[in-house]
Amino acid sequence: MAETLLDWRMLGAVIATVVAGLMRGYAGFGTAVILAPIFATLWGTLEGVPVMLLMELLISAQLLPKAWPEAARRVVLPLGGAALLTMPLGTFALFAIEQDLLRRLIGGFVLVFGFALMSGWRYHGSRPLWLNAAVGAVAGLLKGATGMSGPPVILYLLSGSEEARRHRANLIVFFAIIAIASVVGPFVAGLIDGRTWIRLAVLLPVMLLSVPVGVRAFHVVPQRLYRPFAMAVLLTSGSIALFA
């Protein structure tokens, strides 16, 4: 079985994982919005999403300790709590929606997210508890169905005037909160099997090596250079899933 899994699809997954790891280390997000459409295209949603979710869990554990003291927990904890409540509904959609349609929906959603970031649009209002919970609920639905909770939360959290370090910490803590719960559904449904672990064994070391490089880049590379790179990556990954 291992021989059949180590093919050109795995090579494509390795390349995507390097890019996703660099983005995750640099910006605090990027794993799911890059890997969900790519993995869904390479292996199908039911096989690709669980691999990405397991990597997200392990990377969140790596980044959380340093981010926790810097995060705005008054905002992030309600976001994460609401996402936990709605995630099972999203997991139901993962099984209910036809795979090819779901893959294209993932790709289209990533493209919309990329264009929204490119346009510079952000939410600039206040952040009351009810709104934090509403955004978190939408993110939980997306996480369960597609493996991606980031787009609504990223657009919401990046709206503030906080420095980049605080934005990054908020995103890391939010993703860590929902990472554990996100793998429960695939485990219970039997989606995580021997093929999943083989793929994870190949890709996880790649991710673990890439993330620290991205963290280092956060301290030395001008932040203005990140946006063009991120936009190109998001538009590419979304287009692959939508049109492949």
Image (cartoon, grey):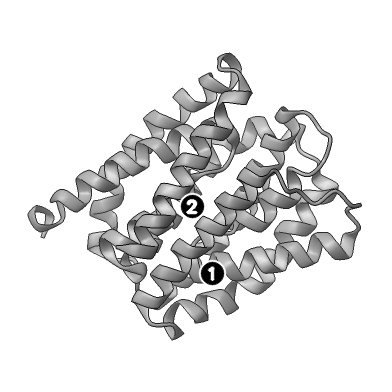
* Label 1 secondary element: helix
Residue 83 percent location from the top left of the image: 68, 65
Q: Is residue 187 visible?
A: no
Quadrant that contains the N terminus: bottom left
- Residue 95 tag number: none
Local crowd size for mark 2, using a 10 Å CA cut-off: few (<14), some (14–19), many (≥20) = many
* Label 2 secondary element: helix
Q: Amino acid at mark 2?
A: Ala
In the picture shown, does residue 59 fall above or below 142? above
How many numbered marks, from 0 up? 2
Residue at (69% x, 54% y) in the render: 153
Residue at (38% x, 82% y) in the render: 98
Residue 159 percent location from the top left of the image: 78, 44
**Is tag 2's residue or tag 1's residue first in the polypeptide sequence?**
2
Q: Provide the residue designation for mark 2.
A: 32
Q: Is residue 153 left or right of residue 92?
A: right
| Residue nearest the observer in this picture, 230 or 76 | 230
| Residue nearest the observer in this picture, 216 or 158 | 158
* Residue sticking out furthest to the front: 119
CA gap, disc 2 to disc 1?
12 Å
Quarter location, residue 209: top left
Quarter location, residue 66: top right
* Residue sticking out furthest to the left: 3
Quarter location, residue 88: bottom right
Q: Provide the residue designation for mark 1.
A: 144
Q: Is residue 193 visible?
A: yes
Q: Is residue 2 left or right of residue 90?
A: left
Q: Nearer the viewer, mark 2 or mark 1?
A: 2
Residue at (67% x, 34% y) in the render: 67
Local crowd size for mark 1, using a 10 Å CA cut-off: few (<14), some (14–19), many (≥20) = many
Q: Is residue 83 left or right of residue 216?
A: right
* Residue sticking out furthest to the bottom: 96
